[in-house]
Image: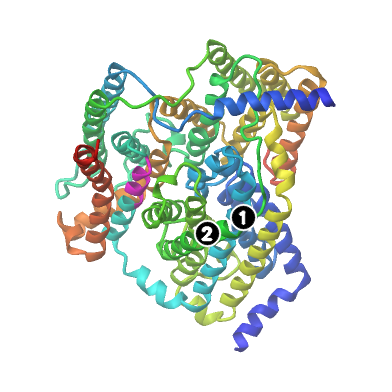
Amino acid sequence: MSDVIAGVGALLDPTVLLCLIIGTLLGTLVGAVPGITATMAVALATGFTLTLEPIQGLAVLLSIYVAAQFGDRVPAILVNTPGTPASIATTFDGFPLAKAGRAGVALTSSALVSAVGSLASILILVFLAQPIARIALSFGPIELFALVVFGMTMMVGVSNGRIAKGLAAGAVGLLLGAVGRDPITGDHRFTFGLPELTSGLPFIAVIIGVFGLAEIFNQIIEARRGGTASPIEQLGRWWPDRAERRTLVKPTAIGTGIGAVVGVVPAAGGDIAGIIAWDQARRASQHPERFGKGSLEGLAAPDSASTATMGGSVTTTLALGVPGDSVMAVMLGSMIVWGLQPGPSLFVENPDLVFSISGIMIVATLAALGLALVRMQGVVKLLKLPLNALAVVIITFCMVGTYAVQNSVFDVIVMLVFGIVGLGMKRWGFPAGPLVLGLILGPLAESNLRRGLLIDGPFAAFQSPIAASLIALSVFALIAPAVLRTLKRRSKPRADAAAPR
Amino acid sequence: MTAMVEERTVQATEVNDLEQAPDQPAQSTRLREILIGAGVVAVGATVLLLAQQLPAEAANSEFGSRWWPSLIGGAITLLGLAVAIVGALRPPVRDCEEPGATGIWQLLAILGLIVVYGIAWRFAHFLVVTPLLVLGIMTLLGGRGWRSLVLVPVVVTGALYGVFGLLLRVPL
């Protein structure tokens, strides 16, 4: 009990509260602007938080982390551009909802379920940190590989009948993830003598290119001369009505559960949790046909899932010293500088810290929720921008945002190239999601598969029940829709023949 | 002001008309789908060739540097064949508007402007070259009047500099 009092008491310092407010504002802003990710904002903020006390610095960094998860939904819903990778799945139903004139309900629902996911995940951090960390520790290389395969097949499964093209896009993504140093031997692969490629393709630049630029490029080439555009004009109501709120409950529960589990797995973050949750909520829904076409259920599941990863991600980082996601990797460095060594001994040496961190995340969640609900009216005014102004804002923010990640012009060139690649994929019917997921998770998949095969031999996946189950689920997820379609086609003529004339 | 509101309403209506297209795969001929599949096969074959130039596997390991790229290259090749076969048997339904010649020209011109901007940025300050880029894009996309050609460049440049240059301390 004294640890709880000491941990929460540390937050009563006015400077800590000020740091929380600054972090929340900054996080919401960076989340809402495509091209600025939470990882980048936390990395940049690290520069001026290292001089602060650990609790103050953690307040800034953690509140950026939390608030960015709220802000990134806004561009995902309004302009079909994920503010950060965690909101990739938000675009599946968020943008169709906005196009259908329900942007207000989508934004409000998203903020509410994101808060539920975040708060639930903080409970995990408080009460289940140690047991969950022990489970995550049992994931070996082959299980991690199987988890990546599972995540990617879920992504392909959302390709709506474009399985072959989705798989091809995912395979190309995995290939792009192989650019740079071999994760095991260190050999250079596909770098073509360019030193910038030694550490791999900059995935932030690729994401911004295929999601942000490609969308606006497509709008430009499709627009009629003199025609200007705001993507969404009819915003509709702000608050979901009673029936809509009721529909949010089940997918939010599914999303929160999936996010909580995925969050504790090292390196698996909100992007993969969101996609898995979207697919699982679709399977559990009474109206799966509405998913991808503007379903509130399809919005609630991934949004609650991606925020629900935060508690688990922080747990993994602090309890094991293994970063739960890329933001945590950056934060890990800051904590070491502050003299806090993440790992199993952290909670032993600083038992009050878990409560301070939980308190920061709770306050940041509530502040970000309040901010999300209050500032939406202002944000939506952006929708009334004509196409030329919208294009200018998106193109320039994408360019400067990409440059700012590493102060690299090369990254901007990569982003432009992938903007054109993304445009081609869009025109030729290839989904962009699997490509990006392959790129992000490719190194994780490759290194773990090779380690698993080297350690346990070619049948490693079949020796692990967890890995075997995940791979079986992946195969099922790919085959089941095709089998069901075939069965439906075969049963339809019989039904037609049996129908009275 | 009234005229501006009306103009926006008309613009939005036009855009909403464009946005109403159903979200289905692009309609294309069987030939086009087969060509797309052939393109994917070509990518896979190229990867397989490039993978052979990577350092050879160590004598005691069959899972070296070239193993994963070769595996992926083979998978891409097979998936390209699948794309071609599926496209030939069941060509997908159209979903995108046909691109207009004006739109393609505008996009190429914008890309050209960005290249020029990248070169100019090496010699002039961000606050000097960025408004010119914004002005150029606005003009290309049909922006007219002081709001489009003066206000937007100034506001966008100011916002970019404020967020990145001042707030996030990015050296612009």
* Residue type highlighted by circle 2: Leu
Residue at the disc numbered 1: A240
Residue at the disc numbered 2: A248
Q: Horizontal placement of A286 versus B150: left or right?
A: left
Picture residue at 45% right of the left edge, 67% below the top: A316
Picture residue at 42% right of the left edge, 36% below the top: A432
User: Which residues make up the magenta segment?
Assistant: A151-159
Are both tags, 1 and 2, on one chain?
A: yes
Q: Horizontal placement of B106 versus A295: left or right?
A: right
Q: Quadrant of the N terminus of chain A?
A: bottom right
Residue A240, horizontal then vertical, whole percent: 62, 55
Q: Quadrant of residue A228?
A: top right
Q: Is residue B82 visible?
A: yes
| Helix, strand or loop at mark 1 | loop
Against A244, residue B56 (above or below) is: above
Mark-to-mark CA distance, 1 and 2: 10 Å
* For the residues bearing labels 1 and 2, Cβ distance under 8 angstroms: yes
